[in-house]
Image (cartoon, grey):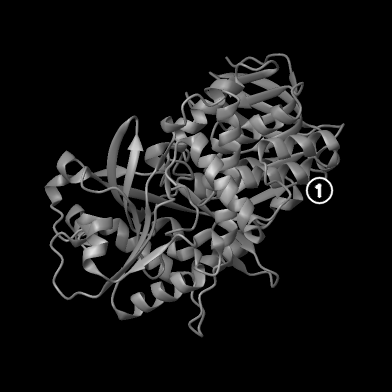
Amino acid sequence: MATTTNKTEADIVLVGAGIMSATLGLLLKELQPDLTIEIYERLGSAATESSDAWNNAGTGHSAFCELNYTPQAKDGSVDISKAISICESFDNSRQFWSYLVEKGILKNPSHFIKSVPHMSFVWGDENISFLKKRYEAMQQSHFFKKMEYSENPTQIKEWAPLLMDGRKDGEKIAATHMSLGTDVNFGALTRSLFDDLKNREGVRLHFNADVTSIDRAADKSWDLEVDVDGNTTKVNGKFVFVGAGGGSLHLLQKADIPEIKGFGGFPVGGQWLRCTNPEIIKQHHAKVYGKAAVGAPPMSVPHLDTRSIDGEQALLFGPYAGFSTKFLKNGSYFDLFSSIKADNISSMLGVGMSNMDLTKYLITEVLKSQEAKVESLREFFPNAKSSDWKIEVAGQRVQVIKKDKDGKGILQFGTEVISTADGSLSGLLGASPGASTTVTIMLNLINRCFPEKAKSPEWQAKFKEMIPSYGTKLRDNAALTEEMTIKTSKVLGLDM
């Protein structure tokens, strides 16, 4: 029979032990060391879902190679505004990680981040025209001045030999190359952050602890019920952050806050092709991104991807999107159905009707055999052999569905932070490029939910210590950007 323990009280309650909670917890503890923090994770270890290396693309998303961050308008122009924003956000992450390395909180940066060039690769006249326009547009920002462009097969082969292995002579191709790119193992990073955080005074990390309810208390704080091995623990938090990946939507709905009304979620699964031939793996050292298929969600942009996981170099291709009604890789097939409420059913149905391309794409992907998946790989690596690759199940993502200004449902790619009007409860919905931009997302959350403290001289000084460019737009300051790039590269052991 389940039993109920006495209520635990904390200044901060973090739900989910992924990169978002780890980053927020450390930022808050650095800003105010006397805060008490309780962290609850439904699984048996940290970073098991979206933050895990095999579930996450691992690209330090800085917009160097991701073509979906630079859409082309009907007049042929390329909009790089989102790319600039993402690049600036990733720089904040680099600065914060460098601060943690210098303080000894992160012991060995090579354990979670390595230099890997970022490339975009396309074929065909139309795509080549787009890539060249993209390159020319990105040259207008100092963030991308070191980007190189080539249509020369010899040069492209030098950058990434597998791309040219077996390719027909005369095929029209083009690529861009950025040596400043990185590979990030967000699973390893998250676990390292929690290793420090859990040993700080006033912080407790609980595994196998499933938050089952969140309710407003009379004093406007929040009461949570947590199932731990069949026993119910009651927790009260002055501030609650729900960073539970695909599980965040359900918990925010249980909190019954007005800000979540109308929001829904569309789950997208995925698979990788993982290379098993060491001779092939060692020939490739780059993250090579192509153009997404019509209707494909952003996390399904195809890429031939050098990774460093558990101390070994790996080579992945994909991801191949799939459909499951689960909201988490370790979730329930009833997740999608239980998320449908009276306030969001119209927007969810509207999204279903207006995104037939996505539906068709997902059905096609689900039905693909391994050989069909390898055929897609051969567009990047023409001599790929099916026997050198195996299927690896990737993570589960839940794309945000929300109502637009006309009350219609729209499918939103990226992340969305939901916060109550008083800032006492906040949660994160959505997916890519979330992990890479975590520091920026959490800085914005802190300013929204702790506005008075965030404005204080003490917190402002600490922000500047942790992120030296804080308060300055790097996009408008080439000299400071270069200074931060040199410093963080040195501290993190990255190539310049």
Q: Report the amino acid beneath label 1.
A: Ala
Tally of numbered tags: 1
Above or below, comparing residue 360 to residue 337 in the picture: below
Q: Which residue is drawn at 71% across and 31% down?
A: 28
> Is residue 435 in sight in this rendering?
yes
Which image quadrant for residue 123? bottom left
Mark 1, residue position:
421
Above or below, comparing residue 496 to residue 241 in the picture: below
Q: Residue at x 37, y 46 (%)?
A: 116
Residue 407 is situated, as x and y percent measured from the top left of the image, at 68, 69
Foreground pick, 156 / 446? 156
Residue 307 is situated, as x and y percent measured from the top left of the image, at 34, 42
Left or right side of 21 for 313: left
Above or below, comparing residue 487 to residue 104 in the picture: below
Foreground pick, 66 / 231? 66
> Is residue 247 in sight in this rendering?
no
Residue 105 is situated, as x and y percent measured from the top left of the image, at 57, 24
Left or right side of 453 for 298: left
Left or right side of 215 for 305: left
Foreground pick, 51 / 288? 288
